[in-house]
Image (spheres, grey):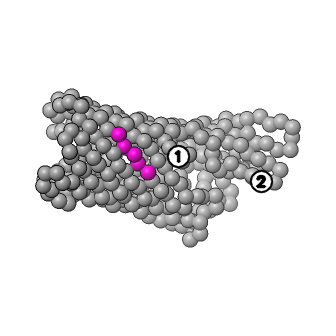
Amino acid sequence: MQLARLVRPDARSALVIGLIDVRSVQRTTVVAGLTARYGLTNRLEVEGRIPYVYRNDDTVSRPINLEPSSASKVFNAEGSGLGDIELAGRYQLNLPKPGHPYFIGGLRLKTRTGEDPFEVDYLAAAPGLPTLQTSLPTGSGFYSLQPSLSMIYPTDPAVFFGGINYQWNIKRDVNKSLKGVQSSFVGEVDPGDAVGINFGMGLGLNERSSFSIGYEHTWIGKTRTDGSVTEGTTRLQTASLLLGYSYRLNKRASLSLSVGAGLTNDSPDTQFTLRLPYTF
């Protein structure tokens, strides 16, 4: 289960003639996922993941116009349902000697089984201002492929790890208008690709428990519509500091808990992840 919470001013505050929209958004996302992994050989494994997503946004909007005062308005939207199903494979590239690192190559496919942003309803907050979603999507709306390379270096009692990945978000011909918004035809959309890195260390405390600390950083490119950069989009950077703890319950099951703190304006303020791996 994953919980992410984001509280920050909306970067898309609008300025038009005689009207300023000051807006803040509180976002909460809860993801419950079922993941299955199967080893085909001692070096190759495949994985499938089915997520269920719940999202809730509270938007506080205060239009400031030529009048002496204007009241704040609160708008709530939520959405829940099946998210984007993922399929992945990982292969151990080498058989290292003691004191040498392991290298693992991976490939992940994300589908678009969740409800996408082009299927939900929209509502204009006020004339001339950006629109709001009346229900929230549970998927990204795009297929993506993510190759990755990871390194694991065991050195008792610690394990060092790191990795790099590239996410190719495949462009899509949406060819429809947004629901509830006039003159909003959307053609071909090419979401920005992303490059990510991560590194950290795990430390064994005793035979049953371990502690980990890590850092992850992702650069996300601009979105393009019909070949041109979409108005109002910018490059994004997300970064998180991760602290984790794992405890082996028995020979088949363990419990893992991690907390992430966002380090940039584009990152969720807090991420909470709870996993219960079980070996059959």
In the image, 7 versus 178, the foreground residue is 7
Q: Which residues are magenta?
A: 213-217
Q: Is residue 59 left or right of residue 86?
A: right
Residues marked 1 and 2 touching at CB (< 8 Å)? no
Q: Residue at x 21, y 54 (%)?
A: 102
Residue drawn at point x = 37 percent, y = 50 percent: 198
Which residue is at a point 41% across and 55% down the rendered structure image?
196
Residue drawn at point x = 67 percent, y = 35 percent = 74
* Camera-side residue of 36 and 180: 36
State the CA–CA distance, disc 1 to disc 2. 28 Å
Q: Which residue is mark 2?
A: 16
**Is 241 or 44 nearer to us in this picture?**
241
Q: Amino acid at mark 2?
A: Val
Tell us which disc is closer to us: 1 or 2. 1
User: Does 173 lie within the magenta span?
Assistant: no
The residue wearing badge 1 is 264
